[in-house]
Amino acid sequence: MTEAVTIEARHAVKAFGQGEHVVRALDDVSIQIRKGEFFTLLGPSGCGKTTLLRLIAGFEMPTSGTILLDGADITDLPPNRRPVNTVFQSYALFPHLTVAENIGFGLTMQGRPKAEVKARVAEMLALVKLEAMAGRKVSQLSGGQQQRVALARALAPQPKVLLLDEPLSALDLKLRKEMQVELKRLQTETGITFIFVTHDQEEALTMSDRIGVMSAGKLQQVGSPRDIYTRPVNRFVASFIGETNFLPATVVSGGVRLSTGDVVAVETAAQGAVTLAVRPEQVRIVAAEESGAIVATVRMLVYFGTDTHCHLALADGTEVVARVQSPASGEAGIEEGSTVGIRFASGAAQVLED
Amino acid sequence: MSSAAEERLRRQSARNGWLLSMPALALLAVAAIGPLAIIVIYSFLTPGQYGNVVWEFSWDGWVSILFTRDIFDGTLGLADAHLTIFWRSVKLSILTTLVAFGLGFPTAWFIATRPAQQRAMWLFLITIPFWTNLLIRTFAIMEVIRAEGVLNTALMWSGIIERPLAIIYTDVAVLIGMAYVYLPLMVLPLFAAIDRFDMRLLEAGYDLYASRWQVLRRVILPIVKPGIVAGSILVFVPSLGAYVTPRVLGGGKNMMIGNFIELQFLAGRNWPLGAALSVTLLVIVTAALLVYVRAANRGSNPHG
């Protein structure tokens, strides 16, 4: 893809504190976000994802580095002069204004004519399906409705980029699922670039065009949900997104040798001691005698409904979890304590250097 | 249960309610309604020769609020001096409220945005002047602004002025004194309102293209309005009835209603006029409050 870049951060550093207590919330992050994409910044709390968002919004100035919008340097522009709007985690709706006044606030501040503001507010109310609530005070709305008002308010001035700071975290599970679909719909309908911050990997995987995984102030990996899930670049990404078995291994010709002595065929350019990462659903349970299978003992079976997790121990005690789809009978056909063989689906095993 | 028994119980509880509220009602009668009734009654009596009143009905107390009787031909004319005093009182009270707001808002904002453990200290500093007698604080201000006072000495020493500024015994002196004395009454309710203000709304405002001024005007002020209303009332009401400050700093010639009332009860020996003036002051304050609170409510709740 060679689409136009909307937002770009170049070597962005944000340090808080002074002297010995300096914390680098953002440590030399460079990223390009394309026009019209749904981009998610994913990471645990304190990883710097919200700081990056605040740099883009203009609430924080980077300690060093630049922020570009459509190729122009906006690093020193205050938030009110950036065509970028934010949906805040707390919504931050104006309690003294009605729903319609909240949505029209940005347009009014831009000095748009009254008639245009009114028309645009009506349009936004329809977009988030809150026409009936136009005259209400925001305190009279439910959490989900407030969320919609916050979205409509941020979208009304037609920003080039919409920033969403964990906007769904305050909603209950059912509402969150609805809003995920809603957000995706709004993004498709408006065609605005969305930068979405979350610590919820499932949210990131289901909604995003691309994901940037962050940890300790650094960008660990950027890629499509499929890339991130199937080709994690390091142990952090592999463990943060989904569950993964990590097996200590050594590179040998034609693959890697596990601590049990079994050789798994993978392609790698790495040398010496590595870690082999395999997703539980890519571990196949076969007969112990099958050639090439790694021998394991079934320690425990945990039934999850759609699938069953088999906790296995290899010959040297290394633990491996296999996720087996539950058959119609509900019985996986595996006994606790029995000896089985395991194989990794082809191409599923990843060699990680750290 | 029979309805007769219910009725008896209900009546008993109503009687108990009245009995229990007797102390409060008695206090209210003695402390509030009683004195007010005396003032109203006195305003319709005839002044005695050496103060006090003669029990003879007369409208004179009320008439002389606005009119004076010509000592030669006995015709009534508008009492310009009285109107000047009323106007000065209202004008100075409004100005005091504005000055207190102008100084108090940044102060309250500053305190409310300090870390939590520092706020108590700042609030404590704001309340310290309350522990000093009003008279002493007023004399302190006098020490600052009089011709050979701290302010003039400093200004002359630094060469900014050549002759001392004639502040003392002017309306400006009264204004400075009242603004100083009543400033804490503005700061405290403003602080309470700003403390409750969600600072995240500032970012929301800036994010939605509002300038600093627009954020102040369209977000902060409307939301902290209850604090502004409370602070303004707390400053305006005592300012209008102020007595000590205009007496000391106004030097007797720049009277306000409070001093004028005192004059009638003491030197003037015209208790009915003093009583009528007191009632007038009460009415002005009540009317001002009603208008202000109405306007404030309408402003903050356009759809309510």
Image (spheres, rainbow, N blue to C red):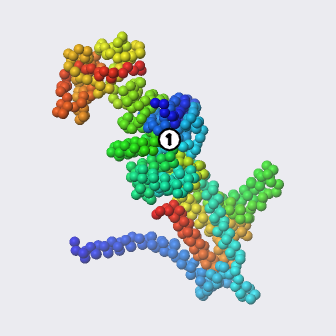
Q: Position of residue B274 (x, y in %)?
A: 63, 77
Q: Is residue B116 at all visible to an observer of this figure?
A: no
Q: Position of residue A85 (x, y in %)?
A: 50, 44
Which residue sits furthest top? A253
Residue matched to label 1:
A161
Where disc 1 sits, the SS reads: strand
Which residue sits furthest front? A2
Tell me which residue sits at (65%, 76%) in the image: B265
Tell me which residue sits at (46%, 63%) in the image: B304
Q: Chain of mark 1?
A: A
Q: Position of residue A205 (x, y in %)?
A: 38, 35
Front-most of residues B269 and A259: A259
Of the residues shown, which amino acid type is indicated by label 1?
Val
Tell me which residue sits at (43%, 53%) in the image: A125
Q: Is residue A164 above or below residue B54?
A: above
Which quarter of the figure is the N terminus of chain B placed in?
Answer: bottom left
Tell me which residue sits at (56%, 53%) in the image: A112
Front-most of residues B157 and A243: A243
Q: Is residue B253 left or right of residue B212?
A: right
Q: Is residue A152 left or right of residue A311?
A: right
